[in-house]
Image (cartoon, coloured by chain):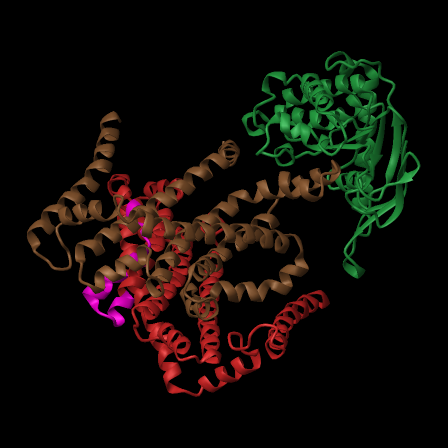
Chain colours: A red, B green, C brown
Amino acid sequence: MSRRARGWAQTWAGVAAVLVLAEVAARTELVPSRYFPPMSRTFAELAGQLGEGAFWAAVGQTLQGWALGLGIAAAFAVPAGMILGTSVVRYRAFRVIIEFLRPIPSVALIPLAILVYGAGLESKVFLAAFAAFWPLLIQTLYGMQDVDPVAVDTARVFGLSRLERLTRVVLPGAVPYLATGLRISSSVSLILAVTAELVIGAPGLGREINAARVGGATELLYALIIVTGLLGWALNSGFATAERRVLHWHPAQRGAR
Amino acid sequence: MLEVSGLSKTYGEGARATHAIAELSFTVHEGEFVCVVGPSGCGKTTLLRCLAGLLPPSAGRVTLRGRPVSGPPEEVGFVFQEYSRSLMPWLSVRENIALPLRHKRLGRAERDRLVEEAVESVALTGFIDHYPWELSGGMQQRVAIARALAYQPEILLMDEPFASVDAQTRADLEDLLLRVRAAYGVTVVFVTHDIDEAVYLGQRIVVLTPPPTSVQEVLDVTLPEPRDQVETKELPEFAHLRAHIFRSIKRRQSLQGQGPG
Amino acid sequence: MNRRRALLIALEAGVPLAALVTWWVWSAQAGSFYFPPLADILTTFADTWVFERVGSDVLPSLARLAAGFGAAVVLGVAVGTALGSFPLARRVAGPLVEFGRAIPPPALLPFAILVLGVGDAMKVFVIAVVCLWPVLLNTVDGVRGVDPTMLETARVYGIRGAQRLRTIIWPAALPQIFAGMRTSLSLALILMVISEMVASTHGIGYFVLQAQRSFAIPEMWSGIVLLGLLGYLLNAALALVERRVLRWHRGARSSALQ
């Protein structure tokens, strides 16, 4: 118990040391405070923002793009993965296409998105969904292909129908893979949502950050970056916690990160 | 040569402490082959790790040629039970054996000679440029033995080295070990839970008690050398010794079983 | 069995080919402004990229990518090794690393422009920061996961210091480090493109966005195709290096499974 307390103290001592160091460096002009304002001013700005409606609107817009992107990606990727992953013939037929499309950097489609959907929410969601689709598809495929053959044979011996085999044997076995896929896709979706806001100018945190830079509001710039980081961290740890809950009964999860 | 006196090892602290080894003492003489045998779950591996300087003892001390052992001494070679995890899969047989020699200030030619001699003595010359994972389990353990020999230790510590190979390979490895030991003239401390193996290989046998482990008795083996898998094991003295050790371990176990728990 | 294999191979080659042909035929007669005929895209691709703009746009982009990626690998392995070896360092740096990698990378672009301007330094910096986290975190995991028996072997045989790192720790962690590098490479490509879209006067990302703004649709498509090809080729190249370097890893794993 005391050992754990000591580890906790060391962790927070590290954080405090970095914050104090940044504060001192800026106050003494060791780093130009024009670029690196003192941490205290950044956090004061952050506290002020928490009372602003516009700030919360931007957070909401970013989260909306993230959620819609992830949701649409899941709606397509999971069924597609199930269809392709349960048959060698179907998988082999589409393998080459997947291998070619997957490494395309999703941001290459930004011009196309602007052209087709304009500079609003639709572009953001399209990009986020496209990028989030691939990790989830791949994980679903792995999950379908990693089903224990003994379990499937057992189910057949006991006369389970095809549909029952899918819902009782294949899907439960694939759940850890889906959880991993969702976690990866969630962070990809957030990255692309912020990218779209930044590059295309769709409303949200990304656009606000850029506006803060252009307007010379340095404290606001840092405050918003910190908020974006906290958002990413919260989503990450939410999914990681959920994943651990799911993995806890499934020891065979491996190789996916 | 190697002296263990009053050695104790305790894991954990306070009420939840487990006493793995308590007040253990014995001596290994120059050039001897000593087998350490005990019931499974007694601190055999812990003991060997203390001898090698891998674990600091809680009390007592280990001295090698009069000098206390505080970290792994340069005179010690070690063969682990888990051969597949103690050989580096990214190095060939030759590189694995040469690895510990790199920091011994040797000329290149000298180093190559040591490696090749060791490989030859374990009869793996044809496999010197293979990777460990291309070899069978018994062959991998021979590589580990060759690595220890090329290191030219004065004392070789072996932790149940033949416990994870099949019976036939095991007999072959035992005879190979006896041969190379004679050739290299190295002192060996060999830990095993197999009484037959201990009697067959050892010149002296240290029998351990269940935990907290200490020495139950030390036996001299006067079986003729060189030993032979068939003839030696047919000798009445062999049968007598193994029965003696077996009873002694069983008696101690049942005594402890009846205790106040 | 042989007929089944032939069928699978035919499918593997046939379906992508059919997809291409469908796109070709459909785009040729659709007359869509957004989706020009594939034939036009390919002609424009040949005119634009072979080898007209290679020196002015492709090579600078790739050089920045290589510089950022390389810096991230060196730094990630170095810091990751330190954090993996010392629990105290891990506890102190833990929250900072967690926070740093949680920031969506494009959010750092305005910061980098503010501090470093719009030149090459900014782009290399952003690419390097993004690539750092996967390499660093995987190195930490890899270093912490080195088999204890291997470490004891090293101790017994007096292998320490630089030799221990070079011959034991890094090779053992290499499969994980490569996994991190694969993730980093796709992120590097993304940030290469974005950084050129936001602030540049050349580069592939700049070219594609500029083409869209001037409604040069076949040019825009040819850039998208080029980025797709680059993504595929870079991934394939890294996979090739990985197969070479980690030959022992696959061998050891498959023999362990038997």
Q: Residue at the spot x=61%, y=63% of the render?
A: C93
User: Looking at the picture, does residue C42 appear above or below residue A52?
Assistant: above
Res C171 quadrant in image: top right
Query: What is the number of callouts on the image?
Result: 0
Res A65 quadrant in image: bottom left
Q: Residue furthest right?
A: B66
User: Looking at the picture, does residue B247 appear above or below residue A41?
Assistant: above
A115 within the magenta span = yes
Q: Position of residue C175 (x, y in %)?
A: 51, 43
Res B182 quadrant in image: top right
Q: Position of residue B236 (x, y in %)?
A: 82, 16
User: Looking at the picture, does residue A155 appear above or below residue C256?
Assistant: below
Q: Residue at the spot x=65%, y=52% of the render?
A: C85
- Choose between A139 and A128: the one closer to the eye: A128
- Choose between B15 and B234: the one closer to the eye: B15
Quadrant of the snapshot with the N terminus of chain A = bottom right
- Choose between B8 and C156: the one closer to the eye: C156
C166 lies left or right of A123:
right
Decide whether the magenta segment is chiefly helix, strand or loop: helix
Bounds of the magenta span?
Answer: A100-125
C80 lies left or right of B43:
left
User: Looking at the picture, does residue A96 appear above or below residue A207?
Assistant: above
Whether residue A133 is visible to the viewer of this picture, yes or no, is no
- Choose between B66 and A107: the one closer to the eye: A107
Q: Residue at the spot x=33%, y=45% of the render?
A: C232
C22 within the magenta span = no
Whether residue A143 is visible to the viewer of this picture, yes or no, is yes
A162 lies left or right of B206:
left
Q: Position of residue B41 (x, y in %)?
A: 73, 42
Q: Position of residue B231 (x, y in %)?
A: 76, 11
